[in-house]
Amino acid sequence: MSKILILPGDGIGTEIVAQALKVINSLNSNNGMGMSLVHGLLGGIAYDETGSPLPEITIKSAKSCDAILLGAVGGPKWESLERDLRPERGLLGIRSELNLFSNLRPAILYPQLANASSLKTEIVSGLDLMIVRELVSGIYFGEPRGVEIRDGERFGINSATYYESEIARIGHSAFQIAQKRGKRLCSVDKANVLEVSELWREVMEEVSLSYPDVALSHMYVDNAAMQLVKDPKQFDVIVTSNLFGDVLSDCAAMLTGSIGMLPSASLDKNNFGMYEPIHGSAPDIAGKDIANPLATILSVSMMLRYSLNQVELADKINSAVSAVLDKGYRTKDISAVGDKVVGTEEMGDLIVMALESQ
């Protein structure tokens, strides 16, 4: 029996996770999965109830589970807090505490949504790329950091730091994913101006020697951003640092028509993972039954595939999402003229119906 920690988080997190739980409950009832659920707190709601965005009990629960399903964290309500108490510090903290260093962010365009993309159909049709983002090092974690007074004025400091071992392990993760896909890996850096990127490129070249079947290329991050918009289908797998991956994955998300469609996985070396949609907590639409739950439901699919070794059930969820889209059902963010616009709850029900009809 698998044990899953459920962390709805803030904003729309509660609504979208509720739809994913419908899918999990269906799998338990109809496919004998036997997933037991443990509920916990993370982010702003955790601060409100415990005084910490990452309570010790959440870390303890996570370490006793097989995987984590997260909604989203953050919101304007907590922006005035000291930095270490803000919801986002809880998210960074749990990633670091569990050593979830490999962040997988697929960007797949469902053919039914080709018209939802802001780019021409011929540019994005058939898009299927994977961004592998290093998640627990780099500028988000490096020291020294902070704001201090220098020469009579405020001076901000952040440090983009990487050990070669940290670069090598994300490299191995990305090469192994590329082996299972199109055997092409593009490493994105800024080696022309950043020494840390020079090291990144050198280590990627060293790691590549262990994967002669994968073609490694390099690209500067500014060019990569341009190429994602100009010709995204040239990419198979992209591997990059924490900061660059954060930016590029959101850019890639919009190629698909909506950030509400994309799941993600954050894995440790043993494929224990935390699964979450890549979008934020969207407090402006929370409680309005208009949030798109598909990225969260597809995160359950990724959880089954990568942490629970249930590839067939993962494929069933993906097929259910396609079937619902085939029938013209859309949440507001991915809708066009003539579509059947439904709310968060109804979309969740439709996915379960499609899943159970297979």
Image (spheres, grey):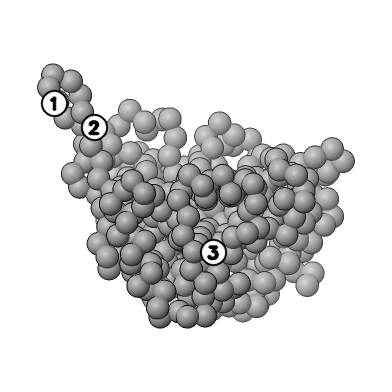
Q: Give the CA separation, mark 2 to mark 3.
A: 34 Å
Q: Which mark is residue 237?
A: 3
Picture residue at 83% right of the left edge, 43% below the top: 339
Q: What is the x, y in percent for residue 130? A: 56, 62
Q: Is residue 60 above or below residue 118?
A: below
Amino acid marked by disc 1: Arg
Residue lying at the far front in this picture: please name it: 192
Identify the residue shown where x is 87% and y is 41%. 338
Q: Is residue 340 left or right of residue 204?
A: right
Q: Is residue 253 above or below residue 290?
A: below
Question: Residue 5, position in %: x, y?
Answer: 44, 62
Determine the residue positioned at 24% across, 49% down.
Answer: 142
First in residue order: circle 2 vs circle 3:
2
Q: Quadrant of residue 75?
A: top left
Query: Dot 1 lies on which element?
Result: strand
Q: Position of residue 229 (x, y in %)?
A: 62, 45
In the rendered structure, find residue 150 and report the number of the disc placed on it.
1
The quarter of the rendered structure image containing the C terminus is bottom right
Which label's residue is closer to the chain start, 3 or 1?
Answer: 1
Amino acid under disc 2: Gly
Q: Residue furthest top?
A: 152
Amino acid type, label 3 = Val
Task: Say few, some or many: other residues with alpha carbon within 10 Å of mark 1 (under 14 / 14 to 19 / 20 or more).
Answer: few
What's the CA distance linking mark 2 and mark 1? 9 Å
Contact flag, marks 2 and 3 (Cβ < 8 Å)? no
Measured from the top left, where is residue 84 in percent x and y? 26, 41
The answer to whether marks 3 and 1 mark residues whose Cβ atoms lie closer than 8 Å is no
| Spatial separation of the CA atoms under disc 3 and disc 1 | 43 Å
Q: Nearer the viewer, residue 90 or 306?
A: 306
Which residue carries the number 2 mark?
156
